[in-house]
Structure formats: C-alpha cells, structure tokens
Image: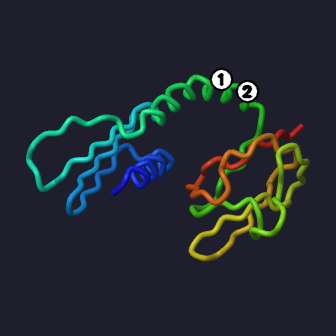
Amino acid sequence: MDLKEIQNLIKFVAKSGATEVKLEMDDVKITIKTGSDSETTIVQQVPVATQMPQMMAPVAPSIDSAILVATPAATASEEDDSKYITVKSPIIGTFYRKPSPDKPLFVEVGQTIAEGDVLCVIEAMKLFNEIESEVSGKIVKVLVDDASPVEFDQPLFLVDPS
C-alpha cells in the first residue's frame, strides 16, 4: 500500500465519522484512529512478517495541522449559520450537483430557489434520486463536494429563508 492510498484512506475515514479503522493485509497492518473532535489522526504501518518495533512518523502531518487550524474557525461559522435553514440528505449515496457531466449545476451559491426546485441528485444503488427543496430562499453555502459520498441526515446546503 503506497502513501497516496493511505492518505485517501485517512480522508475517507475522516469523512465517514468513524473513530477507529483497522486494516490488515498480507504484509501491512494499518490502524487509523480519530478523536471525537476530529483533531487527531494516527496511522501506523507495521510489517506483519517482522517482529521488530519501528519508529512511526506521521504519514500526513499537513492533514493534522489543517484540522487543528480549521477547528476554531468551524465553531465561529456555526454560530453565524444558525439563522439559515439546513437542507439535509434524506438517503445515503453519492452527491452530484449536476444531472450529468455536460449539464449545468442545479443550483449555485446566491441563487434564489422556490419550494420544489431540484437542488441536487443522490445516487443510491444505480438510481439517481432528485432532492427537491422543501423551503424557499437563497442558497448561501454548498456543504458537500460534487461526487462525494453522503450519509443519511448529512447537511448539504444552507438556505437563507428571508
């Protein structure tokens, strides 16, 4: 397993909200632990065949420092976001902002929407489910990257109802 695959695994675990993931393969054993505040990520890569302890350096220190720096800013933005309505995912799947790669986005930041407007699609088991707005207002923020996995009840958009 190379460094790029390990970094992708760390990102996936961070997004999933899991607190600990252990992966054992023929020659590699990896344990990824995240704190309850998503402040720490520990990666250990230990060859299973050898019994000698190894010094482990953090695989991606930039990820840890980015999380630590972003944590105070996130709490400040949560206070500002309290006046907005959060549109959440009704299902688990893959979030898409466009109906197809060659089509324009369903909605953009700053766009005014009405109740019933399609905001995005979520693919679940090869079915594309249109997610419609239950409120009228203005899109303030898109909280999910295009083509990324989403969980049930995960915030997708912030809407200003005024």
Number of dots carrying numbers: 2
Residue at image location 35% in from the left, 35% down from the top: 58
Q: Position of residue 152 (x, y in %)?
A: 57, 56
Determine which residue is flagged by label 1: 76
Amino acid identity at mark 2: Asp
> Is disc 1 placed on a helix, strand or loop?
helix
Determine which residue is flagged by label 2: 80
Q: Position of residue 7 (x, y in %)?
A: 43, 48
- Circles 1 and 2: CB distance less than 8 Å? yes
Query: Which of the two residues, 94 or 62, is positioned nearer the viewer here?
Result: 62
Instruction: Tell whether 158 sits left or right of 8.
Output: right
Q: Characterize the local packing of mark 2: few (<14), some (14-19) or many (20 or more) Cα atoms within 10 angstroms.
A: few
Q: Residue furthest bottom?
A: 126
Q: Characterize the local packing of mark 1: few (<14), some (14-19) or many (20 or more) Cα atoms within 10 angstroms.
A: few
Q: Position of residue 121 (x, y in %)?
A: 71, 64
Instruction: Tell whether 157 sits left or right of 9.
Output: right
Q: CA distance from mark 1 to mark 2?
A: 7 Å
Amino acid identity at mark 1: Ala
